[in-house]
Amino acid sequence: MVTRLPLLRRLSIFGLVTLLGASATAQQAPPPAAPAGPDTPGTGPYPAMKEEVASLQQHVLYRPANIAAMGGQKLGVVAWGNGGCSDDGASTRFHLLELASHGYLVIASGRILSGPGAPPRPAPPPRPAAAAPGAPAAAPASLPPPKTTAAQLTEAIDWALKENARSGSPYYGKVDPKQIAVSGFSCGGLQAITAAKDPRVSAVVFQNTGIFVDGPSPISGMDVSKDALRAIHTPVLYILGGTTDIAYKNGMDDFKRIEHVPVAAANIQTGHGGTYFQPNGGAAASVAVSWLQWQLRGDKAAQARFVGKDCGLCKDPQWTLEKKKIP
């Protein structure tokens, strides 16, 4: 059964993405960095921080700043793929800090390349000279291959579980191996779809993403076909930006094709940029947290946002919720 409820239409700050070319370009293009300013600790019970560690190169960790304060609550793990498959592991830092503040070790691919702790940004390359009048138009510049890979999400899970078992690690005995999730934004969402087949994964959240409808992926190094959906073995949540999201067609097609596991698609009219850059990751981060809390921890209040005809998202005018195999 599919539940459909009205959306609150509002102007997307990223609406111009739909004018910039094909969805492949939009899903591979590097995302804008989070706005300048300090990191936010999130709204959860465990104020969060971010850091890089020598034992896990090319990743950024988001975690409760005081793990000891969690008492008997163990950490869940969320492996995250960045928008554009970029190597800026801080590009959606507000969103990831919010997840971490609810007791999760969130591991993003890449380095801290924006916001606090980032090195100076290199100067942009010079723009090419304009073509002479009457000269044939140059072919559009091709995008470079993604700077991160789906394998880095698996590496993140491997590392977290090894640290959980390593005497002397700050994570020793602090991680629950049954609370493992993968997630990602846009091109990073395709990485998460690829990594979701891992049998250790118990929850997935795919954001502003979807496998390309019109044939194989045109993104270099991201050859993901619809066949990947059949390897998913957990309940699935898609969070999309409504009809102006360049990934809407792809994501909703994924939703329609998934029949073997419970699946939900939550749409909010923000366009492709979602709410990542709003304080504490905005409305989409709140929904992602609720899905993780329900799927990984059995939280009844979180479950109520998705289950039943009068579920929380069902009554929220910002959202349209569609679901299958979920009451």
Image (spheres, helix red, strand yellow):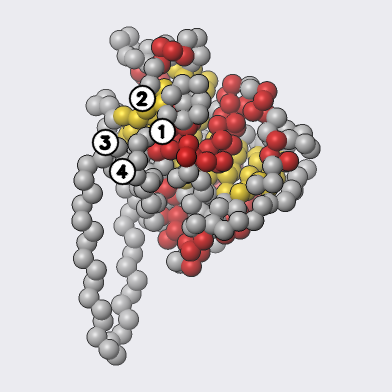
| SS class, disc 3 | loop
Numbered disc total: 4
Q: Earlier in the sequence, mark 1 or mark 3?
A: 1
Amino acid type, mark 2 = Trp
| SS class, disc 4 | loop
Instruction: Provide residue 218's location: percent of width, then percent of height.
Output: 44, 59
Q: Name the residue under label 1.
A: 40
Distance Cα–Cα, label 2 vs label 3: 23 Å
The residue carrying pointer 3 sits among few (fewer than 14), some (14 to 19) or many (20 or more) residues within 10 Å by Cα, namely some
Q: Earlier in the sequence, mark 2 or mark 3?
A: 3
Circles 4 and 3: CB atoms closer than 8 Å:
no
Q: Earlier in the sequence, mark 1 or mark 2?
A: 1
The answer to which image quadrant residue 26 occupies is bottom left
Distance Cα–Cα, label 1 vs label 3: 14 Å
Distance Cα–Cα, label 1 vs label 2: 25 Å
Distance Cα–Cα, label 4 vs label 2: 24 Å
Q: Which of marks 1 and 4 is nearer the N terminus?
A: 1
Instruction: Identify which residue is drawn at 50% across, 29% down.
Output: 43
